[in-house]
Structures are given as C-alpha cells and as structure tokens.
Image (cartoon, helix red, strand yellow):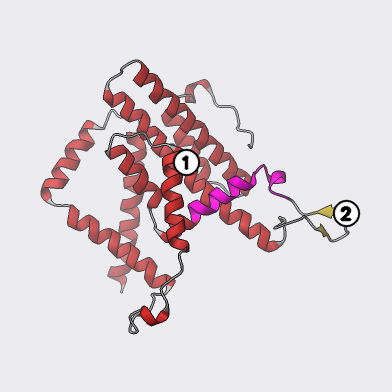
C-alpha cells in the first residue's frame, strides 16, 4: 500500500475522510496519486464499517447505523473509481513497455529491468479486480452505484464482498460472446461510441424526467430538508451541483444547434 499522509485530528471524522479521498482522486495526475486516493477511500470504508458495527452493538438508532452504511457506500464508490483508473493506468504502462506484462525484460543499456506490479505497490489479484470493475462499468455503466444504492434501500450493509460479487457477474456478462451474426436483426447497425454516449445521456435524462412528477419531487424536497443534518449532506449537494452544471452544458449544446 502507498503511504498516506498524516491526517489531522480535526479530520478524523468520516465525512472529512471521504471528502479528502474524493478530492485526491479528482485531482490525481499520476498512478501514485490514484493509489493514494484508493487507500484513503479504503481507510474511510474501514472506519465506517467499524462505526456501523459499534452502533449495532450499542443498539443505536437505525438512523445512526444507516448513516454509517451511507459512509461505507460513498467510500466504496470512490475506491471503485480509483481502481478503474488504476486498471487503465497499468494497462497503458504495459502498452508503453514501462511495466512488464510477463517476465521483466532489460531495457536500453541492458542494466535496467521493466517495473513489475510489486514495484508499483500492487498485487496481481488487485490488478485483476481493478480490471473487473472497469470492465463491469463498461458493460453496464453505473453498476457500482446501482449495487450500492440497492443495498442501502434494502437496509443492508454495503460491503466489498457484495459489491465484488455483483461487479464480477456484470463483468462476466460483458465478456459473453455475442450472438452469431445469423441470429441478429440484419437491419441492426451498432451505434458508434459517440452515438452510444449520446444515447446514455438522453436515456438518463428521459428516465429522470419520467420519474420527476410533482408528487415525487415534493417527496424529494421533504427528504432533502430531513437530510440537512446528515453528515454526508454536503457530498450529496456537491453531486447535485455538478449534475446541474452538466445539464446546463448539454442544454447549451442543444440551443446552439
């Protein structure tokens, strides 16, 4: 594991740990910084998991246990994003020849060998898991967030094990061979990556618009008021602000056409 810089006593609370992990990942420019963000998120997950167990042992109010579970989910989502970045960084380094894909080879003057996974502070199983998460998200965009949300909605603890199982299933579905050409609709033309991206945007907005009835929005507004004292409310607010900015940008595209 990469070494994590000391955390001040004022930042020992869960929201600060999660916020710091998210900020570190957002600003990461190197694989080492992505590793640091992953480790921060892992630390936040471990702290949240212990907090949830302590609250259950003390027979604490359900809201306190649920808050700890939401912290676990936030931490797992950040950790998963970091692992996806690591998978891309590692594969790119292998493609450049900077990291060995098998037995390390000497380079240039013959005195230096290619770096290995262990040189980078990674185990083979960690690289494999990172690739699975990346491939699962490619096969089913948003799978990590959906799995975590489902666990929370069902009142279940969002654990690494549960996320790993669902992600592995999604990755396997993505690796299944496609149907033979003879069984496909002969008129079907697969979308280009650009068209697929636009379809993802329109599908997301269409689904939200269909959900956003006056009744559902009224419920959501009341829920927002009730969540103001939630220790992770600022993270939810930040996500909404970012989503609103993206919505405005896409609307500007449409208005400019």
Which of the 4 image quadrants contains residue 67? top left
Decide which of tag 2 and tag 1 comes sooner along the chain. 1
Q: Mark 2 falls on what kind of element? A: loop
- Identify which residue is drawn at 54% across, 50% down: 130
Residue matched to label 2: 111
Q: Which residue is mark 1?
A: 22
The residue lying at 72 percent from left, 61 percent from top is 97
Position of residue 149 measured from the top left corner of the image (x, y, whole percent): 32, 43
Label placed on residue 12? none
172 part of magenta stretch: no
Q: Is residue 120 left or right of residue 145?
A: right
Position of residue 23 relative to residue 243, above or below, is: above
Q: Residue at x 52, y 31 (%)?
A: 43
Principal secondary structure, stretch drawn in magenta: helix
Q: Is residue 91 left or right of residue 105?
A: left
Q: Quadrant of the N terminus?
A: top right
Distance, label 2 to label 1, CA atoms, is 40 Å
Q: Residues within 10 Å of mark 1 (few under 14, many from 20)?
A: many
Is residue 225 visible in the rendered image? The answer is yes
Q: Check residue 124 for magenta coloring.
A: yes
Range of magenta residues: 116-134
Residue 5 is situated, as x and y percent measured from the top left of the image, at 60, 31
- The residue at the far top in this view is 58
Secondary structure at badge 1 equals: helix
Which of 46/56 is in front? 56
Res 237 visible: no
Which quadrant holds the C terminus? Answer: bottom left
Rendered image quadrant of residue 249:
bottom left
Toward the bottom, the furthest residue is 186
């Amino acid at each position: 594991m990469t070494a994590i810089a000391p955390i001040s006593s004022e930042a020992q609370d869960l929201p600060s740990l999660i916020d710091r992990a998210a900020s570190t990942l957002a600003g990461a420019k190197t694989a080492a910084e992505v590793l640091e963000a992953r480790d921060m998120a892992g630390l936040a997950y471990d702290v949240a998991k212990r907090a949830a167990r302590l609250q259950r042992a003390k027979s604490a109010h359900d809201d306190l246990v649920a808050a700890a579970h939401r912290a676990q989910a936030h931490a797992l989502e950040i950790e998963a994003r970091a692992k996806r970045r690591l998978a891309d960084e590692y594969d790119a380094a292998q493609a450049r020849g900077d990291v060995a894909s098998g037995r390390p080879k000497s380079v240039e003057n013959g005195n230096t060998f290619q770096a290995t996974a262990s040189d980078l502070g990674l185990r083979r199983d960690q690289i494999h898991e990172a690739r699975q998460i990346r491939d699962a998200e490619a096969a089913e965009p948003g799978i990590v967030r959906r799995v975590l949300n489902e666990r929370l909605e069902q009142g279940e603890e969002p654990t690494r094990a549960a996320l790993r199982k669902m992600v592995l299933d999604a990755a396997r579905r993505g690796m299944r061979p496609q149907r033979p050409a003879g069984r496909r609709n002969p008129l079907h033309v697969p979308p280009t990556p650009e068209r697929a991206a636009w379809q993802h945007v329109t599908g997301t907005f269409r689904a939200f618009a269909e959900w956003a009835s006056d009744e559902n929005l009224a419920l959501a507004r009341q829920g927002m008021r009730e969540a103001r004292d939630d220790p992770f409310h600022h993270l939810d607010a930040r996500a909404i602000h970012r989503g609103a900015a993206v919505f405005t940008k896409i609307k500007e595209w449409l208005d400019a056409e």
